[in-house]
Every structure is written in structure tokens, then in C-alpha cells.
């Protein structure tokens, strides 16, 4: 299977694929210190909830190797982007490893490996959702570029494709920075998965025509009640899916669940620069712009969560199964 690997640890060096340049250029950059990784996260050179967690883990490992202040490194990394919980999750795991005297390079590698394993398991459990002839819609990029291996929303697609199931994917372009058209479409092309790119606003029209059988998206954070924070536009997609009776699945590893936050209303939604919205329309430069990067989809609009423990109706069940496996 042709799947990109956006984060590499090679000969003690951290290499990140610069996702801002995709699909035109495939360029890996070396990051030698925490500040450089923080910048890469802020500038979306590395992006996607699990991937920024893995990058942050390696940044902590570099800081440890260099004898830097790890509490300060942790604080800077946590601040880099506020919404995806995987960032804080990975940093916290690294601090716990430090307190136990674990080699932090091994600890970062373990987080990377755990992420890969979770994607495989999501794929295995989620693949049966894709039946022969199915038309699947996805939003943003919750693929290999956003994670470590098969991605989350794309993992069932990769495995169904490998099993020879014929299906078609509709990819939302995902305004304003086009993760769908630049990244998801690129990944699916590399894997040979049949797909069609659409404007975000075309999704309702396709559903009205009966052209979509199910939706699978990723998540930046799923709160204790199952509310799902994901790329801006996910909420409107879920509302439209509910109206048309189209099942709406959230693919997420347990590292994306935030049991300490009761509902999506409590999550800080990142506001990004206006330039992302008006970059391609210089005529309107100077106009007031709001650019919230994420929105909250209420739990009642989510049909089920595809997790490493199975496709579950209730997100609490994922945490219960996790606590049984890891006391
Ligand atoms: O702003 P981005 O590109 O980091 O947003 C990414 C998303 O919203 C993804 O859907 C989410 O992080 C899940 S990735 C498995």
C-alpha cells in the first residue's frame, strides 16, 4: 500500500514533511529544537491531531537529549495549537516517561508506534462499514499525513481497497486551506483509491440526490459526552447528513478522547489568521474576516465512533475498554 509517512526519526534526526508545499513538492525538513517544531505546528507544516502529538513527543525527546528545560518545552508545545487534545496528551505522556526515568527517545518512538497500531485497528474495525458500491464522503484530511500510518478516517478506506471492495470517495476540498484537495486527494491518488473532489458546499446537493451512503471524518477532540471537535465545516456536514438520513461516523483513536472536558462547548476553538481566508482573493484584502479552524458536532448527530476498540455508539465505551486493557 502506498501510504505517505510525514514524520520520520532517522539517525537521531527529526524529519517532518512540509505539508504546506503539498501536493506540488515533497520536502522533508529537519527540526533540531522545540521552537522549530512549535513553528511547524503553528504554520501547519505538520498538522492533524495525532501527527502534531507525535511531532511534539519527538520535540520533547530532542529537548531532553539537549539538556533543555522540559517543563518549559512542554508549555511551549501545548500552546502551539489549542484545540487538538493529542498534543497535550503526547506531551503529558512524555512528562510521565521522564518521571519514570525512561529514555525519552524510546518514549517518543513508542507514541509513534502506538499511533500506527491504533490506525490499523481503526481500519480493521471500520472497513466493514464500506460495502461494495458504497459512496463515502470525507472532510479535511484525516489520512496518513495527519497521523502516522493509515490515518483515521481513511484507514477503513485503505483496508477496504486492499480487500478488493469497489467503492468511491467524495472529498470535500475543505476551505480555507484545502486539506481535502491538496492532501486527501493526493493520498487517495497515491493509493489508487477512486475519488472525486467536490466543493464543501456541494455535499448537501449530493446527499439530496441520494449520492452519498455514509460519511467518515476524523476528530481533533471528542469530549466526554461524545461531542466531536473537527475541522470547520464538519458540523454543517453532520446536520445535513442527519436531514438526509446519511450515517455519520467519526474515526478517532482513544488519544483523541478528552474525558476531562464534559462537552464541546468548553473546548477552545483556534482562530487562525485572516490571510488564510483572503489569500486567493486580494480584491477583498482589508475586509473583516473570522477564521475559526474547528467546530463542534453534537454527539447526537454522530452515528458511531470508529475506534481501535471497535465501532462504538458510545464514546465512554472506548474509554472503558481502554481501562480494561491498560489498568
Ligand atoms: O487544521 P488541521 O489541518 O490540523 O485540522 C485537521 C483536522 O481537522 C483533522 O480532521 C483531525 O485533526 C483529525 S486527523 C486524524
Image (cartoon, grey):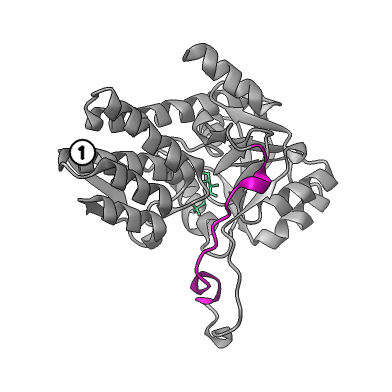
- Residue furthest bottom in the image: 283
In the image shown, does 102 or 20 lie closer to the viewer? 102
Q: Is residue 309 visible?
A: yes
Q: Mark 1 points at which residue?
A: 64
Residue 4 location, x and y as percent? 37, 43
Decide: few, some or many residues near mark 1? Use Cα within 10 Å; few <14, some 14-19, many ≥20.
some
Q: Nearer the viewer, residue 170 or 167?
A: 170
Q: Position of residue 44 (x, y in %)?
A: 42, 57
Q: Give the range drawn in magenta.
A: 262-279
Residue pictured at 49% horizontal, 13% vertical: 325
**Is the magenta region chiefly helix, strand or loop?**
loop
> Residue 300, how many percent across, how many down?
77, 37
Task: Say above or below: 84 vs 89.
Answer: below
Q: Which residue is drawn at 50% across and 69% down?
A: 273
SS at badge 1: helix
Q: Is residue 273 located in the magenta-colored stretch of the structure?
A: yes
Do we see residue 211 in this rendering? no
Residue 216 in the image: above or below residue 186: above
Rendered image quadrant of residue 202: bottom right
Residue located 33% across and 33% down the image: 95
11 on left or right of 61: left
Horizontal and vertical percent for residue 182?
48, 58
Q: Which residue is drawn at 57% across and 27% down?
A: 307
Amino acid at each position: 500500500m502506498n501510504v505517505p509517512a510525514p514524520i520520520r526519526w532517522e539517525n537521531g534526526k527529526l524529519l517532518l514533511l512540509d505539508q504546506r508545499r503539498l501536493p506540488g513538492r515533497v520536502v522533508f525538513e529537519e527540526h533540531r529544537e522545540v521552537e522549530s517544531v512549535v513553528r511547524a505546528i503553528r504554520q501547519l507544516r505538520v498538522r492533524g491531531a495525532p501527527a502534531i502529538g507525535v511531532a511534539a513527543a519527538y520535540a520533547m525527546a530532542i529537548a531532553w537529549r539537549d539538556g533543555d528545560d522540559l517543563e518549559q518545552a512542554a508549555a511551549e508545545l501545548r500552546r502551539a495549537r489549542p484545540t487538538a487534545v493529542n498534543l497535550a496528551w503526547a506531551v503529558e505522556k512524555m512528562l510521565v516517561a521522564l518521571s519514570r526515568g525512561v529514555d525519552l527517545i524510546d518514549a517518543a518512538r513508542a507514541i509513534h508506534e502506538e499511533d500506527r497500531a491504533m490506525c490499523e485497528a481503526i481500519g480493521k474495525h471500520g472497513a466493514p462499514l464500506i460495502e461494495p458500491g458504497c459512496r463515502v464522503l470525507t472532510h479535511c484530511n484525516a489520512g496518513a499525513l495527519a497521523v502516522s500510518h493509515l490515518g483515521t478516517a481513511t484507514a477503513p478506506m485503505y483496508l477496504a481497497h486492499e480487500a478488493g471492495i469497489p467503492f468511491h470517495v467524495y472529498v470535500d476540498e475543505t476551505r480555507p486551506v484545502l486539506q481535502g484537495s491538496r492532501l486527501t486527494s493526493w493520498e487517495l491518488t497515491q493509493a489508487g483509491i477512486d475519488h472525486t473532489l467536490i466543493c464543501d458546499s456541494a455535499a448537501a446537493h449530493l446527499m439530496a440526490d441520494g449520492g452519498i451512503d455514509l460519511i467518515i471524518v476524523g476528530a481533533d477532540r471528542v469530549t466526554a459526552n461524545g461531542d466531536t471537535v473537527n475541522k470547520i465545516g464538519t458540523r454543517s456536514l453532520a446536520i445535513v447528513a442527519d436531514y438526509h438520513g446519511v450515517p455519520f461516523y467519526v474515526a478517532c483513536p482513544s488519544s483523541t478522547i478528552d474525558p476531562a472536558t464534559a462537552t464541546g462547548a468548553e473546548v477552545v476553538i483556534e482562530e487562525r489568521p485572516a490571510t488564510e481566508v483572503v489569500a486567493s482573493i486580494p480584491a477583498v484584502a482589508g475586509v473583516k474576516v473570522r477564521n475559526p479552524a474547528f467546530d463542534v458536532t453534537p454527539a447526537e448527530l454522530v452515528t458511531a465512533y470508529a475506534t481501535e476498540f471497535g465501532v462504538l455508539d458510545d464514546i465512554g465505551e472506548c474509554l472503558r475498554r481502554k481501562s480494561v486493557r491498560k489498568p
